[in-house]
Image (spheres, rainbow, N blue to C red):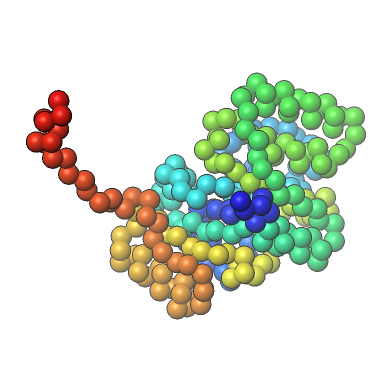
């Protein structure tokens, strides 16, 4: 069985975002840019300083394709937990003042999330603890459990507060980080071919590039009516 550190992580992103990664830039967003209002429910003096990125543990998900690739131009990139952790560790080592976390999101019923949030707020009112503040981003309501998330978090209290609006660019070796790229299963073949050629011929990506087979038509099976009738 594969150990947790070497387990695969997946993310569906817009095609140009995948290109940015292969060219060496991994984008981290401020949670205020996400749809779930619970992500930024708690206000504190360092809430500007946390940036995160979300990955999933599920290789195939109809829901995730429909949410994150509505125009059929999304791609699913794959890495491992160990490779992502190495990229974060390297960034923190080279950039003074940053801290990191890579951990699974815990999904709970809404009352449990509210209770946990209140406990964290009470603790923070007793004194600033960055680790506890980070915990707020690793508890989500069950309505989002289809995401099956692992979150990468970067925290830097000395960062310019204006960075909150534009996000954080983390330099990475994209060709080392990304192992494969799957194109949207609903994308027309002409588009699939064009994107594949760009990734392979222009960007020189050596990993697997192919169209997702999520909606590939299976082999048809025929029921022989006479046999069924004989068995009744």
Give the vertical position of 115 relative to 3 (above or below): above
Q: Please name whichever residue, 80 or 181, is drawn nearer the observer in this view of the structure.
A: 80
Q: Would you say 211 lies left or right of 226 here?
A: right
Q: Kindly identify the residue that appears in the image at 79 percent across and 29 percent down.
A: 121
Q: Would you say 232 lies left or right of 196 here?
A: left
Q: How many labels does the image show?
A: 0
Q: Kindly identify the residue that appears in the image at 81 percent across and 37 percent down.
A: 132
Instruction: Single out the residue that lies furthest toward the right.
Output: 127
Q: Can residue 77 be seen in this view?
A: yes
Q: Please name whichever residue, 140 or 160, is drawn nearer the observer in this view of the structure.
A: 140
Instruction: Single out the residue that lies furthest toward the top.
Output: 111
The quarter holding residue 168 reads bottom right
Image location of residue 155, percent across then percent down? 77, 50
Q: Kindly identify the residue that appears in the image at 21 percent across and 46 percent down.
A: 221
Q: Can residue 16 be seen in this view?
A: no
Name the quarter where the C terminus is drawn.
top left
Q: Would you say 208 lies left or right of 178 here?
A: left
The quarter holding residue 33 reads top right
The quarter holding residue 119 reads top right
Instruction: Single out the residue that lies furthest toward the left.
Output: 226
Q: Please name whichever residue, 172 or 125, is drawn nearer the observer in this view of the structure.
A: 172
Image location of residue 216, percent across then percent down? 31, 53
Image location of residue 148, percent across then percent down? 57, 41
Q: Would you say 52 lies left or right of 61 here?
A: right
Q: Kindly identify the residue that appears in the image at 28 percent across and 50 percent down.
A: 218
Image location of residue 124, percent across then percent down? 84, 32
């Amino acid at each position: 069985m594969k150990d947790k550190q070497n387990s695969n992580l997946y993310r569906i992103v817009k095609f140009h975002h995948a290109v940015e990664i292969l060219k060496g830039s991994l984008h981290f967003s401020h949670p205020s840019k996400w749809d779930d209002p619970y992500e930024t429910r708690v206000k504190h003096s360092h809430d500007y300083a946390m940036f995160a990125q979300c990955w999933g543990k599920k290789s195939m998900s109809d829901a995730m394709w429909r949410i994150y690739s509505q125009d059929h131009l999304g791609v699913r990139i794959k890495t491992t937990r160990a490779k992502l952790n190495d990229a974060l560790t390297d960034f923190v080592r080279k950039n003074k003042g940053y801290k990191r976390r890579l951990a699974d999101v815990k999904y709970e019923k809404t009352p449990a999330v509210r209770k946990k949030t209140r406990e964290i707020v009470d603790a923070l009112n007793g004194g600033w603890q960055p680790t506890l503040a980070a915990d707020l981003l690793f508890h989500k309501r069950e309505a989002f459990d289809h995401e099956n998330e692992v979150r990468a978090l970067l925290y830097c209290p000395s960062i310019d507060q204006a960075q909150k609006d534009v996000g954080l660019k983390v330099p990475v070796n994209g060709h080392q980080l990304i192992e494969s790229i799957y194109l949207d299963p609903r994308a027309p073949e002409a588009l699939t071919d064009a994107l594949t050629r760009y990734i392979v011929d222009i960007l020189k990506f050596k990993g697997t590039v192919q169209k997702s087979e999520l909606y590939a038509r299976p082999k048809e099976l025929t029921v022989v009516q006479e046999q069924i009738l004989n068995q009744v």
